[in-house]
Amino acid sequence: MSEVLYMDDMYLKEWDTKIESVKDGKFVVLEKTAFYPASGGVEWDTGKLVRKSDNKEFKVIYAGKFGGIISHQVEPENELNKGDDIHCMLDWDRRYLLMRYHTAAHVLSGFFAKELGALITGNQITTEKARIDFSLDDFNREKIVELIAKSNELIEKDLPVETYYKPKAEALADQNMVKLANALPPDVENIRVVDIKGFDYQADGGCHVKSLKEIGKIEFIKADNKGAKNRRIYYRLV
Ligand SMILES: [Zn+2]
């Protein structure tokens, strides 16, 4: 089981480790990784692995989670082997942008839940734009625009964002905690919490900025009605 470094240090950009296994010449499992795998609607990290024996570089073009294990797809193929010592580097510009988007999604979801009673049903976060899906009876575009303005005001207040762990039973008993229908991770004893101090906390295994101002500004792109109750909004960071 590889150690997942971003859970406790989301600003880690480089580290050393060994290759635990290689499948089909290109799917690499590392003993320690900070590559975030595509999950929770957030895109994957990219970067590179440098083999220490000869300094040869391998691109990480995708990271995914399979059976609970983070697998890294590398290029070129058929060269890395189990036991190789490597130095890992994230494409930090991409990761940091995804972190800013992810925390922005929590700010928006927090307002939609608190002020509209909306149930958040999904997220999609890329480096270009993001969307949030939610379920709501009455759709009012002006209200959405107003909540985005409120989100930007909150970001200006620069609240700290903390991560910590709570026993699962305690997390499950907390109504405030699970707004995403599929937010709770599977069989783990402790639930990781992402807490925008004084605003909103969620069970979450993703990467976030450590204070709100790092997000920048949320810009509304558009809103769609996707059926009787399903709404979708698109936004970008500027
Ligand atoms: Zn999240």
Image (cartoon, helix red, strand yellow):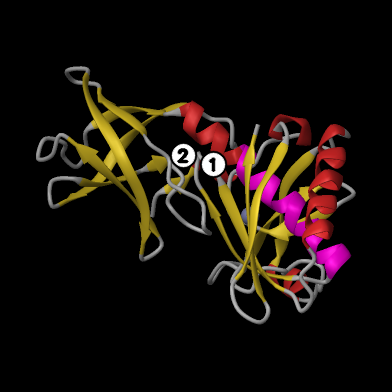
- Residue at image position (71%, 31%) is 216
- Residue at image position (26%, 32%) is 59
Q: Is residue 105 left or right of residue 107?
A: left
Magenta segment range?
Answer: 100-116
Badge 1 element = helix
- Which image quadrant: the C terminus? top right
- Residue at image position (48%, 32%) is 94
The residue positioned farthest toward the left in the image shown: 78
Image coords of residue 133 (percent x, y): 62, 65
Query: Label 2, label 1: how many angstroms apart (C-alpha)?
Result: 5 Å
Task: Identify the mark nearer the N-term, 2 or 1.
Answer: 1
Residue type at the position of mark 1 = Tyr
Q: Using the image as rendered, state which of residue 105 and residue 139 is in the foreground.
A: 139
Q: Are marks 2 and 1 in contact (CB under 8 Å)?
A: yes
Q: Using the image as rendered, state which of residue 234 and residue 40 is in the foreground.
A: 234
Question: Magenta stretch: residue 115 in it?
Answer: yes
Residue that carries the numbered disc 1 in the rendered image = 6
Q: Which mark is residue 34?
A: 2
Image coords of residue 38 (percent x, y): 43, 53
- Please tell me how crowded label 2 is: few (under 14), some (14-19), or many (20+) other residues with Cα within 10 Å: many
- The secondary structure that most of the magenta stretch takes on is helix
- Residue at image position (84%, 59%) is 143
Badge 2 element = loop
Eyeballing the image, is 174 above or below 30? below
Image coords of residue 183 (percent x, y): 62, 67
Q: Is residue 197 left or right of residue 6?
A: right
- Please tell me how crowded label 1 is: few (under 14), some (14-19), or many (20+) other residues with Cα within 10 Å: some
Q: Is residue 6 left or right of residue 75?
A: right
